[in-house]
Amino acid sequence: MDKNTQAKLYEWASYLLIIGSTVYFFVSHKEVTLTMMGIILALFCRTMMSRVRCRMFEEENEELKLDLRRLTNLLEIEKKKKKETAE
């Protein structure tokens, strides 16, 4: 499972838990503990979603940094070649 799918799964799970907890609270009128547990699980899912997205962005950032280093090295090599051919 890729990270984008995993983030979407956590997002939808949190929405379902919040909706389910709200419906259960209005139906039961007494079970506050179970409702709070559902909301806490929804918060956990949102936290996991943020964590997965953060890691996904960090990996993409590292790839971009490596590409920038490679391009910078190629540019330096080209400058050296032009300098040598000009002399």
Image (cartoon, rainbow, N blue to C red):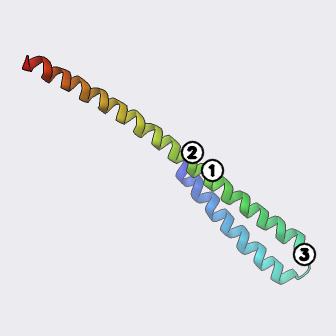
What's under tag 3, amino acid-wise?
Answer: Glu
Name the quadrant of the C terminus. Answer: top left
Residues under numbered marks 2 and 1 in contact, where contact means CB atoms less than 8 Å apart: yes
Q: Which residue is located at x 89 percent, y 69 percent? A: 33
Secondary element at image label 2? helix
**Res. 31 mark:** 3
Image vertical order of residue 55 relative to residue 86, above or below: below
Q: How many labels does the image show?
A: 3
What's under tag 1, amino acid-wise?
Answer: Arg
> Which sits in the foreground, 24 or 39?
39
> Which sits in the foreground, 83 or 55?
83
Q: Name the residue under label 2.
A: 55
Q: For the residues marked 2 and 1, what is the alpha-carbon distance in whole angstroms? A: 6 Å
What's under tag 2, amino acid-wise?
Answer: Arg
Outermost left residue: 86
Q: Mark 1 points at which residue?
A: 51
Task: Give the x, y percent position of residue 68.
Answer: 35, 36
Q: Which residue is located at x 36 percent, y 35 percent? A: 67
Task: Give the x, y percent position of residue 79.
Answer: 19, 26
Label 3 environment density (alpha carbons within 10 Å; few <14, some 14–19, many ≥20): few
